[in-house]
Amino acid sequence: MNEFFPDVPKIVYEGLDSENPLSFRWYDAEAEVEGKPMREHLRFASAYWHTMRNTLADPFGVGTAVMPWDDGTETMDNAIRRVDAFFEFLEKVGIDWYCFHDRDVAPAGATVAESRANLELVTDHLAQRQSETGKRLLWGTACLFADPMYVHGAATSPSVDVFAHAAAQVRAAIDATHRLGGLGYVFWGGREGYDTLLNTDMSRELDHLASFLHLSVQYARQIGFEGSFFIEPKPKEPTTHQYDFDAATCLNFLRQYDLLDDFDLNIETNHATLAGHSMPHELDVAASAGSLGSIDANMGHPQLGWDTDHFPTDLYLTTMVMRCLLQVGGLPHGGLNFDAKRRRGSFEPIDLFHAHIAGMDAFARGLQIAAAIRADGRIDEMFHDRYRSWDGALGKRIEQKEISLEQLEDHAMHSGRPELNSGREELIRSIFNDLLR
Ligand code: XLS
Ligand code: NI
Ligand code: NI
């Protein structure tokens, strides 16, 4: 357990008086909030692609990340060593769950069969490390966007052969996820989208995407995979218009193609903001449909218009997310996956720890503040008060669909001009701020 990060001890909770940067000031895994340990409320996961594979390259320069355990080759030896480094990291940082793409953990081979064999070998090793450490797979997925073959999409490619190759890749990734006892399997759209309608048959491509998802679910159920399927909405990047634009678009797609029973949504903060929404908006849309499955916990930058995947450190954000999770009673099949990367300047191995600690503490604090807001009750009371008029006889009749338009006209004629109350937004925000401590 001391091979790859020799200078890092196991990170423990030390409280706010501690100035030890390698400690938690807020995240106390076993401490109970609303009768449940933080560990369960938060169910943190680390993303293999960022933690192990992100070199911190950007369009202007090569990677800066220092990764002494990685010799930079696409060999199986290197792949296995990375797994060991990752599990040491998980153990030391105290994260119980992880997520991966097939190609993050195992190199692609020259053929479909070779790629599958590589993945199976690494899966064996992951299974072994899981059983030694008790770490678990939150979800698996397939990288259907990096290979040049997917330049025009995978399930929505104009080439039927590419569709078949994508299917082969997903089959192997579902097998690996199933073998590792993954709680879920994610479809993030990758290159499923378009750049111009001058060359794109959108409706045909969407039909193909739906068939792809149906086939995948059918296969997974047939091999006994009982986990959840998630779609991860994102509006743009890499394509100009991604088909899984936002939560509402995805729900409409799932409903149209009779996939709503099989899929929930994996909502990512930075994708929400790219879509011109807020994270709480996307969570609310998903939760209202009973389709909130899991969360990719990161955040964007207000001055940057792309998926920067910052670690989530904004307390307003983490509080709003945790308030939503407390309201829906948690995510039975999901968690908080740090789909987040360090800044290019934070290139030392130790920064992996600082980054995750920052995100974990921000969420632990968000959880405590959200619970305090609920215990305080004033904001919830004002929320419910706003709709009080609907609790009377008229409101009930409308909500139970026992009224006609004529009867409503009659009511309006006799009730005079409605009296309205203030929305008290500033007061609510001020109470929120008071509880942010
Ligand atoms: C990319 C996505 C991706 C998914 C997994 O923007 O967030 O990382 O979470 O394929
Ligand atoms: Ni994501
Ligand atoms: Ni993303």
Image (cartoon, rainbow, N blue to C red):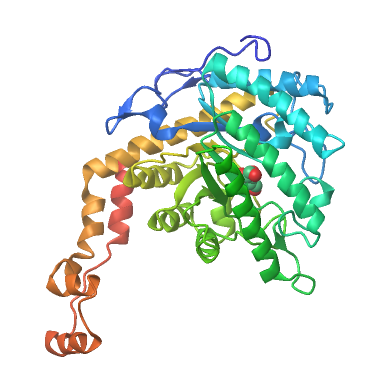
Q: Does 392 appear above or below 35?
A: below
Q: Does 195 appear above or below 144?
A: below
Outermost residue, front direction?
222
- Where is residue 54, by image quadrant? top right
- Where is residue 329, by image quadrant? top left
Q: Is residue 368 left or right of residue 254?
A: left
Between 405 and 46, the one nearer to me in the picture: 405
Placement of the N terminus among the 4 image quadrants: top right
Placement of the C terminus among the 4 image quadrants: top left
Q: Does 362 appear above or below 416?
A: above
Q: What residue sits 82% from the left and 32% below the top? A: 114
Q: What residue sits 79% from the left and 34% below the top? A: 115
Q: Is residue 142 visible?
A: no
Residue 63 location (% of width, % of height):
79, 34
Between 137 and 392, the one nearer to me in the picture: 137
Q: What residue sits 22% from the left and 70% below the top? A: 400
Residue 132 location (% of width, % of height):
56, 14
Residue 68 location (% of width, % of height):
76, 19
So how many labels did they put on this image? 0
Q: Is residue 279 left or right of residue 208?
A: left
Q: Is residue 48 visible?
A: yes
Residue 23 location (% of width, % of height):
49, 19
